[in-house]
Amino acid sequence: MKYAQEYRDKLCTAAEAVRLVHSGDWVDYGGNNGFPIALDAALAERRDELYGVKVRGNLMPGPLQICECDPELSHFVYHTWHCSSYERRLCDQGRAFFIPMVFRHENWYYEQFLSVNVAMMTVSPMDEDGWFSLAGAMGSERFILDKAEHIILEVNEAMPYICGGPEVKVHVSEADRIVEVGNRPLWSMPLPAPSETDRRIAAHILPHLCDGATLQLGIGGMPNALGELIADSDLKDLGMHTELCSDGYLALSKAGKLTNRRKTLLPGKGVLGLAIGSKEMYDWLDHNDDVVGLPLSYVNDPAVIAQNDNMISINGCLHADLYGQVGAESTGTRQISGTGGQLDFVEGAIRSHGGKAFLCMSSTFTGKDGVARSRILPSLAGDIVTTPRSLACYIVTEYGAVNLAGLSTWQRADALISIAHPDHREELIRNAQEQRIWLPHNKR
């Protein structure tokens, strides 16, 4: 291999590699499975000699040793583009900070506004041409590398090599240091078993799908339930164009439903920007010529998404109010996750010929006090709006799916109350009356 010597010349220990970091630097970690675990631990070991090091990451499984070793934030300050459950706890404790963003714009943020002194990322083993796959978060990491002054690669033999061009890879010639960690298990996120509520929600979406539709699926039990229904249906020749590839797509492929043959954009190729799932899913993606990784500046661009005819976007949310505003990232001011690509795919799907965008939630949730509360609210008072009412299309609960496109305020209130839990409808009607978005003769 012609690049083997260059690889060996740059090989070092994690402790040696992180000597590239200095006080005051901005350091970027790779996201999810791109999280450089060994380098993070080595950087934490330098705590007492470093001050004011600022670190950015995205959807980390945790733990982050730089955070665990410095609860006072005197040495390291961590920032996240999208919260995992671990990062959410850090934000709750004031030990990490969220960066609001729309995923398709991440490249723009780095190009125009952000500095990166050192980038650290976990990658696949090198191929014969000197390339490593950025398989963990390939859709967003190339932007960071292009801005970085120094690049450190952590090579994990378990990382899949996802097919794609130079825009989702890094070459050995770009690296300053290389660290090997052997065959370290990847973050596994198999889909949870769907609940009965998930199945009822999925059943309301299934009639909207057609042969040849291209799917974007979020994470959770509901996409899993939909996958089960599709597997048992007569649907065929479905396609994949998604920010995040999860086990739902593997299930569709195993059922013979995911062929990508009838896609109008990149026919024959499933498109992804990120991948988090089970080991079986990672094995499926590894060197799979039927799947291609691309930058999120492309994958999540609404104009690109819209080139897929019959584009179906399916995402979860936390709340919707009677005006059609949708919150998917906070409860009050508490950050739960992030905007991510939801807004990108809502806009892209509704611009697609035959496309539809679905935002799904259970009608109620149970609080810590054991009381069931409605997810359909009079207004999002304090909750962060993820999808504005001007873009919200289909809202789905276990009680039905309603399309808000083109509806006035009273029509929206009427539609949303119809899919609220029956125990909360009368109160929501009273709220709608007080908010002057209810006709006196509306059905109750």
Image (tube, rainbow, N blue to C red):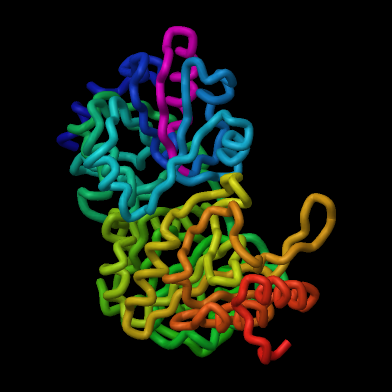
Residue extending farthest left: 2
Residue 156: quadrant of the picture:
top left
Magenta stretch encompasses residue 56: yes
Whether residue 199 appears in this view of the structure is no
Residue drawn 19% across the image and 27% down it: 6
Magenta range is 36-58
**Residue 149: image location, x then y, percent:** 23, 27
Q: Quadrant of the C terminus?
A: bottom right
| Depth order, front residue of 192/102 | 102
Picture coordinates of residue 163, whole percent (x, y):
29, 56
Q: Residue at x 63, y 32 (%)?
A: 93
* In the foreground, 217 or 165: 217
Q: In the shown orientation, is residue 53 left or right of residue 399?
A: left
Is residue 126 located in the magenta-colored stretch of the structure? Answer: no
**Identity of the residue drawn at 41% across and 44% down:** 159
Instruction: Using the rendered image of the protein, determine whether residue 353 is visible from the camera's viewpoint.
Output: yes
Question: In the displayed image of the protein, which residue is found farthest to the top?
Answer: 49
**Position of 407 relative to 64 (above/below):** below
**Is 154 drawn above or below residue 255 in the view shown?**
above
Q: Position of residue 176 (x, y in %)?
A: 24, 25
Quadrant of image for the N terminus: top left
- Answer with the quarter of the image where residue 343 lies: bottom left
The answer to which quarter of the image holds residue 52 is top left
On the image, the x and y values in percent for residue 48 come to 48, 8
